[in-house]
Amino acid sequence: MGGMVPIFSNKIVHFVSSPRGAKITILFWALLILVLTATAPTAKQYAVNAGEGHIRDSNPSAVTKQLMEEHFPSSEGMAALLVFHSGDAIAGDEEAKLESFSEWLASDKKPSSIASAVPFHAMPAAARDQMISDDRSTVLLTVNFQEGLSSEGVMDALDEVQVYWDEHGSERLQLEMTGPAAIAADTLTLFRNADFVLMIATVLLILVLLIVIYRSPLLAVFPLIIAGMVYMAVDRIIGLSGESGLFDIDKQSLSIMMILLFAVITDYCLFVFSRYREALADHDSKYTAMRQAMTHVMEPILFSGGTVFIAMLALFASVFKPYHGFAPVFSIAVAVILFAGLTLIPALFALVGRRAFWPFMPKAGKRAARVGIPVWEKVGTFVTSKPKLTLLLLGLPLVLLSFNALSTHYSFNLMKSFPPDTPSRVGFELLEEQFPPGELAPVTVILQSDKPFQADASLEEKLGRLKEQLNAYGELDSIMPDPARLDVMGMDSLLSENKQILTFKAILKVNPYEKEALDLVERWQDDSGAILNESGFDSVRDSLHFGGQTAEQLDVRTMNQRDTIVIFTLIAIFITAILGLQTRSIRLPVYMMLTILLSYAATIGLTWFVFHSLLDYDSFSYRIPVYTFVFMVALGVDYNIMLVSRIKEEARKHPWRDAVRRGVTSTGGVISSAGIILAATFGVLITQPIQELFLFGFAMAAGIIIDTFLVRGMLLPALMTVGFKNRKMHESRVIPRGQDSMFR
């Protein structure tokens, strides 16, 4: 295994591969699961939606929110927008139904979780007209829920509202609900039972693929048994962490963690029993055979698990809550998976022995004439005999796809990730057609001073100029309430109790979640000093703050840009360093990382081509690049390490070109099998209704196939053949273990 693997690894190999050690290992895992199941909660009990904020709530929109909560305290929480729509102008009897409905919302008979509602029934005609679209086909009402109400509570209340309207409203008026509260409720509905469906689909898919590939029922069942045991342990350990308050558990991270766990455990099982089958042909003792197999597989598993673990630790450097929330969940999962790969997997296979391969049980003394399958032998021969041609044939299309990734458009509009028939999306699209889109999420504007404002004519004049300055940037529909139209007495309604904070709402002409809205608020922020000075305020003493969902999404964009650079850089550096430790080389890890990055870029380019050019998508979720990079790079390294470890092993006995060929031949079958299963496992996400998960599943499946068959199976071996072809030490002679300096 070389000097870089810890000394204790040999002891682990001997222990888990011995008759007594294998039984103790299985007993330890069984007791661990029993104790955790009896004493620890499941992770789902403490799972929450992480939100899209800064981990320290120090971004500009969070500061604005804190100022609002401090100076304009309210017991109201999230708002829902009730959109009533008819094909024609609303008639008198329909308006009467709306009045009756509004009275119900103002009464004690409404759901107790609703804190307040706009009193449509008590408003004069002029005020009502502001809530009715120009063609009088659509009415917009707002309800506010109690502060701190859970998504489940919001969903239950909205269900009651819908039932009441269905029973007492007008059949000609369609009710759709949107806004932050309805979006939260729809998100909960979409994810309800998703984990169970994903687990069943993942298990059945892996089972079918393993049976088809290996034609052995036990080989198909064992990885699932092991993955199930590991999942039970990981779930309870994460649950304990959530119970103790160590970190928040993000719901989405649990779904993806489960898929990662089953996929990686299956990979490790394939790595172990592929070498175990070879070793059983050399030894009568099933325990001796496992010891020999683990001697070869221990290093690849240790380093591959280590690289994935390091990649997950890199997520701790992120400041965006969803990315940062992945770090503890996945770090715990990967650590337990790695421990299982070194102990539980070899112990179980050692106990079962040859029977695991029934009905094709290997016999001692009957080693196969060739190691590997014929197709990979042909591939290995081709790429090592014509490496430059291979690099050209594969490299050119991958590079072209990578350039296509540069044209990808990313969206920060959560609504686009929902299915088209989702109620909150339907409601929002109705609003877009009938009202200024900014009605859905107005921008909160705060003017703060270090001394109290005087509610006089001078302030009224300055606020009028402030509105003009904001409007000069375009895309501003209106100010609510318009501070320039308030009299001096009415000005007090905009001020905080200490008179140092003044606030109003800005209604945009554009979709508050789209790029144009984010760019507008960003320009307001960047030019806030000049805007204040031009309005007659003092930019030294006074400051402008912007809040609301548009400002929050702008902060998300800023955090995402920052985290993308940090995460990509750290993971690339850390994994290259670990690959350097494993290969004891400088150049080879660079080659490996370059092929991984090329594979990733080509995957993004291919995904954009399929969904944009063929399926007419105009953008992707902004999270797709980070999610895909983290998992593709971390998991792709597994196959790198398995291939290079085998080439190193072969290079001790054969010339370099032959070593590369034999490495491709012997690992091609197991790596391609693992890749197919891994791709299919992530492909299960394509069944999910959320577009973000759908796209992520497609990107991962496509990327793993590219990485497994093209990059790992052909491009990297060709690059290694060309890159080291002139080394004299690759001539036909045995290289002592620990002196494989051809990698330097």
Image (cartoon, rainbow, N blue to C red):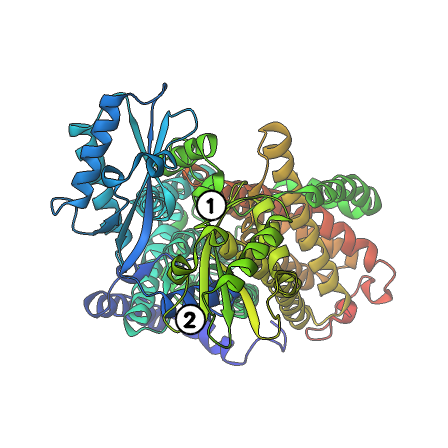
Residue 139: image x %, image y %? Answer: 34, 32
Q: Nearer the viewer, residue 719 or 310?
A: 310
In this view, the residue farthest toward the left is 109
Q: Position of residue 94 (x, y in %)?
A: 25, 24
Question: Residue sitting at 22 percent across and 38 percent down?
Answer: 102
Q: In the image, 707: left or right of 215?
A: right
- Asked if residue 11 lies left or right of residue 73, the reply is right
Q: Going by the image, does 165 lie left or right of 515?
A: left
Q: Position of residue 36 (x, y in %)?
A: 25, 68
Amino acid at pointer 2:
Lys
Distance, label 2 to label 1, CA atoms, is 36 Å
- Where is residue 656 shown, x and y percent of the image? 78, 59
Numbered mark located on residue 414 in the image: 1
Q: Quadrant of the C terminus?
A: bottom right
Q: Which residue is denoted by mark 2 in the rendering?
A: 499
Instruction: Kindly state the secondary structure of the residue where label 2 is placed.
Output: loop
**Amino acid at pointer 1:** Leu
Q: Residues within 10 Å of mark 1 (few under 14, many from 20)?
A: some
- Vertical arrangement, residue 663 with respect to residue 121, above or below: below
For mark 1, give the secondary structure.
Answer: helix
Q: Identify which residue, 731 or 617, lies in the foreground.
A: 617
Q: Residue at x 73, y 75 (%)?
A: 739
* Comes first in the chain, label 2 or label 1: 1
| Mark linked to residue 464 | none
